[in-house]
Amino acid sequence: MTDLSAFSLEGRRVLVSGANTGIGQGIALAIGRAGGQVIGVGRSDMDDTVAGMAGIGGSFVPVRCDLADPDAAGQMLADIWADAPLDGLVNNAGIIRRADAVAFTEADWDDVMDINLKSLFFLSQGFARRAMEEGRAARIVNIASMLSFQGGIRVASYTASKHGVLGLTRLMACEWAARGINVNAVAPGYIETNNTAALRADATRSAAILDRIPAGRWGQPDDIGEATVFLLSRASRYMHGAVVPVDGGWLAR
Ligand SMILES: NC(=O)c1ccc[n+]([C@@H]2O[C@H](COP(=O)([O-])OP(=O)(O)OC[C@H]3O[C@@H](n4cnc5c(N)ncnc54)[C@H](OP(=O)(O)O)[C@@H]3O)[C@@H](O)[C@H]2O)c1
C-alpha cells in the first residue's frame, strides 16, 4: 500500500522566494495544503498570499527582501534561520527582459543574471551551509524553464540564466547529495503569470504557443505547486539533480 504520509510536508518549514504572486504563490499555497509552513520572501507586499493561506488554514510568514542585493539576502537568511531552522528552499523569484539579441543591453543582462542565477546560487549556498552544520536533511527546489532546454526568442539573459539554473541544480546535487541535501528543479512550461503577460498579449505568439501545447491549455501556478511539494517531500528522497518538466507536454512535442 502507498504510504501517503511520504507526500506530506507536516512540520516542514520552507522558504519560498517571490511568493506574492504567480508561480511562487501557487507553490506557497500547495505547501500549505500539504501541511507545511511557508516563509515567503520578496520585495513586494504579500497580502494576497497571506489571505490565500489564511483561507486554507496554512501558516505563512511574509519577509521583505530585495534578493538582488546579496548582503540583504544573506542577512535575511541568517535572521530567518535564527528564528528556527529551515527544511526547504524554493528558489522561485525571477525576472525576464525582452529585446532582440543585437540590441540587448548590459543592464538587461545583469539585472536578470543577478536575480535568476547569482541570488539562486548564494541563497542555496547559505541554506546548505547551515543545514550541513546542523546535520539536517534538507531540500532545495529551483524553478527552471523550458528555456533551460531551448533557445527562445528575444530573451538572451533569461535563456542564459535558466540554462545556468539547470547546470547549478546538477552541480549542487552532486556536491551535496551525500550530505543529506536533495537539489532538484521544476521546469514550468508556459504558465499564466505576470512573466508571460507580454506573450499572452501578442495574439500571434500566444496562438502559436497554445497550438504547440499537447494539453491544449496554458498552465496555472497551481500546476507547478504540487510538483514542487513532491520534490520537497520524503517521497522524492532518492532524487538528486533531476529536472521535472511540468509543461502540458511541450517538451514531448
Ligand atoms: N510564467 C511562466 O510561464 C514561467 C515559465 C518558466 C519558468 N518561470 C519561472 O518561474 C518563476 C516565477 O515566475 P512567475 O511566472 O510567477 O513570474 P512573476 O509573476 O513575475 O513572479 C516573479 C516573482 O519573483 C519576484 N522577484 C523578482 N525580482 C525579485 C527580487 N529582486 N527580489 C525578490 N523577489 C523578486 C517577484 O516579486 P515582485 O512582484 O516584487 O516583482 C515575484 O514574486 C521565475 O523564476 C520564472 O522565470 C515562469
Image (tube, helix red, strand yellow):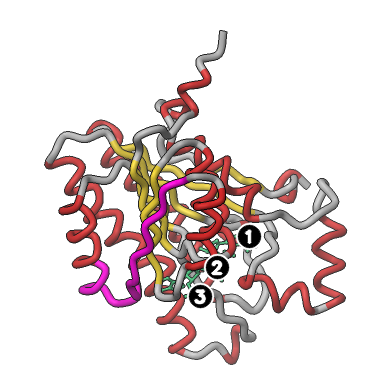
Q: Which mark is residue 157?
A: 3
Q: Amino acid at mark 3?
A: Ser
Q: Are marks 1 and 2 in contact (CB under 8 Å)?
A: yes
Q: Residues within 10 Å of mark 3 (few under 14, many from 20)?
A: many
Label 1 residue SS: loop
| Residue highlighted by disc 1 | 150
Q: Is residue 114 visible?
A: yes
Q: Residue at x 44, y 43 (%)?
A: 184
Q: Which residues are drawn in magenta?
A: 58-73
Drawn side of residue 53 relative to residue 250, left or right: left
Q: Is residue 243 visible?
A: no
| Residue highlighted by disc 2 | 159
Q: Residues within 10 Å of mark 1 (few under 14, many from 20)?
A: few
- Residue 241 spot, x, y in % from top left: 42, 40
- Label 2 to label 3: alpha-carbon separation: 5 Å
| Residue 62 found in image quarter | bottom left
Q: Are marks 1 and 3 in contact (CB under 8 Å)?
A: no
- Label 1 to label 2: alpha-carbon separation: 8 Å
Q: Amino acid at mark 2?
A: Thr
